[in-house]
Each structure stands twice: as C-alpha cells, then as structure tokens.
Amino acid sequence: MPPATKRKRGEGQWALGYREPLNKNEENKKNDDGLNVRRRIIDIYSKAGFDSIDPADLRGRFRWYGLYTQRKPGIDGGKTAILEDEELDDRYFMMRVRIDGGQLSGPQLRAIADIATRYARGTADITDRQNVQFHWIAIEDVPAIWERLESVGLSTMEACGDTPRVIMGCPLAGIAEDEVLDATPQVREIHDRYIGSPEFSNLPRKFKTALSGCTAHCTVHEINDVAFVGTVNEAGEPGYQAFVGGGLSTNPMFAKSLGVFVKPEQAHEVWKGIVSVFRDYGYRRLRHRARIKFLVNDWGAAKFREVLEKEYLGYGLPDGPEPAAPLPRRDHVGISRQKDGNYYVGFAPKVGRVNGPLLGVIADLAERYGSGRVATTVEQKMVILDVPEENTEPLAAALAEHDLQVRPSTFRRQTMACTGIEYCKLAIVETKQRAMDLIDELEKRLPGFDQPLTINVNGCPNACARIQVADIGLKGQLVVDENGDQVEGFQIHLGGQVGATFGKKVRGLKTTSAGLTDYVERVVRNYDEQRQDGETFAAWV
Ligand code: SF4
C-alpha cells in the first residue's frame, strides 16, 4: 500500500458534512433503506413475479437480504466485462444465509437441507465466511424460505450489502480445550443488538467482523474489517485485542491492532463505536475506496483509537497485549478432544460444495453419533460437535462413505474456491469444478504430500477465496494458449500467508485452465523435493 496522500476533494465522509450522495449506490441508499425491501419482496415481488421488481431493488437493496441475481447460464467469461448487468442477470437468485459464529443446531441444519432440496435444486455451498449459499432461488419462494429459516432462528438479513455482515466465530467456541475465552455471548449480543438496526444499515461499504477466543486464530482476523481476538491481560483476565482495517481485493491490507484491552462485556459497545467511526468517517465517494481499510491506512491505528475513544466511547480503553501467534493450520479438521471430554470431528467437503440431501445425511450422523450440533468453518469445511470418544471412529467411517473425509489430503483440506462462472456475474472462469478436479488429480499424482499448503481458486480479480494469502493463489482471467486463442486461465500468486505476507504475483506467470494441474503438480513437487525440514512453502518460494 503506498503512503497516504493528501486528498483535496472530500471523500464523502458524513462526519465532515458530505451528506449529499456522490454516486449511484449512495443515492439508492439515501432514497430508501435497504432493510425496507423485505416488505416489498413479501407483499409485491413474490406475488407479481420477477418482472415486477424495481431495478434499484433488484441490483441494490436485495443484497440487504442476501439476494443477488445469479449469472445467466451459458455466457462465457469473455463477456463478463462487456455485457450490461441486465444481460448477465438470470431470473433466479443466489441466497446467502448468515450463520453468526458458525454453529448450527440439528433443526437449523435440517432447515438448510430442506430449503436446498425444495427450493434451490439441491444446491448449497459452505462459504469461506461460514455462510451457506443457495442457488436457483425463485422470487416467488423467498417468503416461504424466510419463514422456514426464521422458525429455527436463522436469517438472510444483512448477509450482503453495505452492512455489518455475518460475524465469524470459532466453530468450537465454548468447547475447545485451549480457547482463551468463549466468544459466543459477545457474538450473540452484537448480532441481537445491531444486526437489522437502521443505525448501521447504510455503511459506506460492506463490513466484516470476526470475534473469537480461539488459539488457532481460525477466524483469520487479519483480513477482517474489525476483529476481536482473545487475549489475557496482565491481571490474568481474558478479554480481547481489537483489530481494524483488514481486507483483500484491490489494495490488500492486514488489520492493524488498536493496542487495547477490551473486556468481554464491553465488546459490543466497542464494536458499535468502531462501526460508527466507519459509518461517519468512511469514504463514500468511490466504491473501490470505501472499505474501512482505506480510512485506517490514512489515519493509522493511533488516530483511529483516539477518535473511537474520544468521540464514540467517551472513555479510554486500557492498553492490552497482542494475542499469541496462530497455529500453522488454522482449521479444525480432524478428531480432537473438547473441554467436556467429548470430541469434535472436523471433515472436508471439497471446496465447500455440499447439497441438500448430503446436509440431511450430515444432520442424521450428527444426531446419531453426537448431540446434533454442527458448525461451519472459514475454510469451507464442517465440524460435528459433542461426539463421545467411542463414536468418533464410527462417525469418521460413516462420513467417509459420503466422501467427507476426517483425515483428508492436504489438497482436499486446504483448497478453497469461490463461486466462479457457474453463478457469479463477475466471474471470468470456472472455479468450483476446476478446483475439485484439481484436488482429485493431485491426490493421485502426489499421494504422500502432507505439508501445509493452501491453494485458493478465484474466478476473477476479486478476492472472495482470498488469493493473496494462499501459498498458491489462482486469479481467474483470460489467457492466450499455444494456438494464440483466448481461453480460461489463471494469473499465479505465490507464497501468501495470512497475517504475514501477500502472495507475489509472478510476472508473466499464467496458466491456462487446461494446464493448471500440471503447473501445480510441478510447483508442489519442486517444493517437496527442495524444502529444508520445517521450511514452509512461503519461505521456500
Ligand atoms: Fe465472483 Fe470474483 Fe468473487 Fe469469485 S472472486 S465469487 S468470480 S466476484
């Protein structure tokens, strides 16, 4: 990130008096609160059908309820940048369900499975923010889906849009043997007080929160807009360090520590203060500069803390220690002991792709072998909780019958993929199936490889599957093949590591999709042959 430059024009910050909208998005938000679209969906659009939807709702406010139109099938990636939105829009929707904290009860998982089967042609993906994403949703079915979700305490409210999105949490909160503290009450409190509140339904841009006491730092706090990370102060009390300004996409930045100590019972008001700073001082002129990271980069952590304390909290926070370093693998795949003597069993669906019937099977197994509780991870994986020791191996065997592996290869465990061209209007290339094929092939070609290694497959220059922090980050784009034809392919970034370094874009290093497996095999083989003991991929590359 270049050093902050002095800007002459205002950036549309409300706190500096710029209340007039400076672009179309801001105008739409000013015209009507995104939260109000719910009523219109229930009363009008679901009854009168797709063609009755106001375009400002369709391409704007629907996001406040986790709804995007999906990509019209059959349009190739070369058309992504040249076609208008309307030409790319299908008449069906992607719907995102927020799972704050990542933990699901048995009835909640069953509701998701039923919705996938009844309304989404079976589709369901676990996202890298612990959400579930459906596809093929018809507008006529949205009220019934909401009713079903709300009957079990789930919702799609503020799952997308310029809002506080899902609050990520450790899937093992409350049960991990070594957690610094159980963050579940704070996740709930922030959710219940502020999600859906008009106070925060018009932010400059999306706002991502992570809140966890996990020692593995499984919520990847470094790339969230705000994060509360468990730590222990000098008096031995557990609480949180607060981080602000993390984010990927263009101008990737790791979050900066505010250097404070936040008591658990204070977390909700400090969160409120931070999101208020963003709402009031965040940049609203240009969408691509509207994330909180740009404000934090210009101000620095010290000024951000000062404004937070003086203008919003009305008191100073004590200085606090930084959390301990993360573990080399931050996921919760495998079988491990809980603090109550039971075990958790984490397993790896490939790149988060599951489906309605399979989720039903997982719900059955969680009930038969555990307490019924299940969780999603930020690595597109799942965990069955509360399993008595004697049930762990039978459960692992039962999961394996459905190709859900508890002891997966590195490739299955650590490969993620974004939605890609199958459904995403911004995509240039196919991702999910490509990544699943890549995993299968690498498992065959490199059966003994067991080092930590992340492979993140993105369908476009955005960073939904976090290309910049992967060992091997693959950014979808059109490339020229050996015949001179434009075909799907990837720009390669190597050696990224969450919280430490962004992957290096290797100049000119691109591969066609057809050549992807050979390329990755070659790199991984070289690493495996040349690495010193304990040398990570990022250090080797
Ligand atoms: Fe779509 Fe691009 Fe995000 Fe992938 S990275 S889901 S293609 S916007």
Image: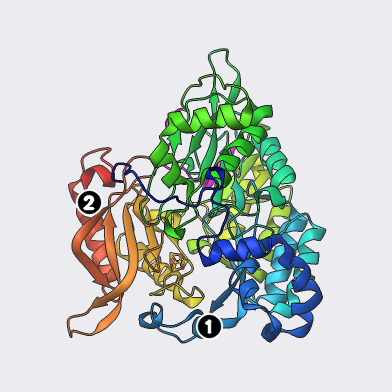
- What secondary structure is found at the residue carrying circle 1? helix
Q: Nearer the viewer, mark 2 or mark 1?
A: 1
Residue 330 in magenta?
Answer: yes
Q: Residue 258 has which mark?
A: none
Q: Nearer the viewer, residue 344 or 5?
A: 5
Taking the spot 26% from the left edge, 63% from the top edge, the residue there is 521
Q: Amino acid at mark 1?
A: Glu
Direction from residue 246 to residue 179 in the image, left or right: right
Of residue 475 and residue 394, the one placed in the foreground of this image is 475
Q: Residue at x 28, y 38 (%)?
A: 534
Count the numbered circles shown.
Answer: 2
Say above or below: 251 vs 233.
below
Q: Position of residue 88 (x, y in %)?
A: 50, 82
Q: Secondary structure at mark 2?
A: helix
- Identify the image quadrant of residue 525: bottom left
Q: Tell me, yes or no, if residue 27 can be seen here.
A: yes
Residue 306 coordinates in the image, percent (x, y): 51, 27
Gap in Å between the C-alphas at discs 2 and 1?
Answer: 46 Å
The quarter of the rendering in which ligand 1 is drawn is bottom left
For label 1, the residue is: 86
Q: Position of residue 219 (x, y in %)?
A: 52, 44
Q: Residues within 10 Å of mark 1 (few under 14, many from 20)?
A: few
Q: Earlier in the sequence, mark 2 or mark 1?
A: 1
The span shown in magenta is 324-337
Q: Residue at x 53, y 67 (%)?
A: 24
> Pointer 2: what residue?
527
* In front of the other: 411 or 403: 411
* Residue 43 horizontal side relative to residue 423, left or right: right
User: Residue at 73% across / 69% down in the picture?
Assistant: 114
Q: Is residue 195 left or right of residue 257?
A: right
Q: Is residue 479 left or right of residue 329?
A: left
Q: Residue 345, percent across and down?
A: 59, 47
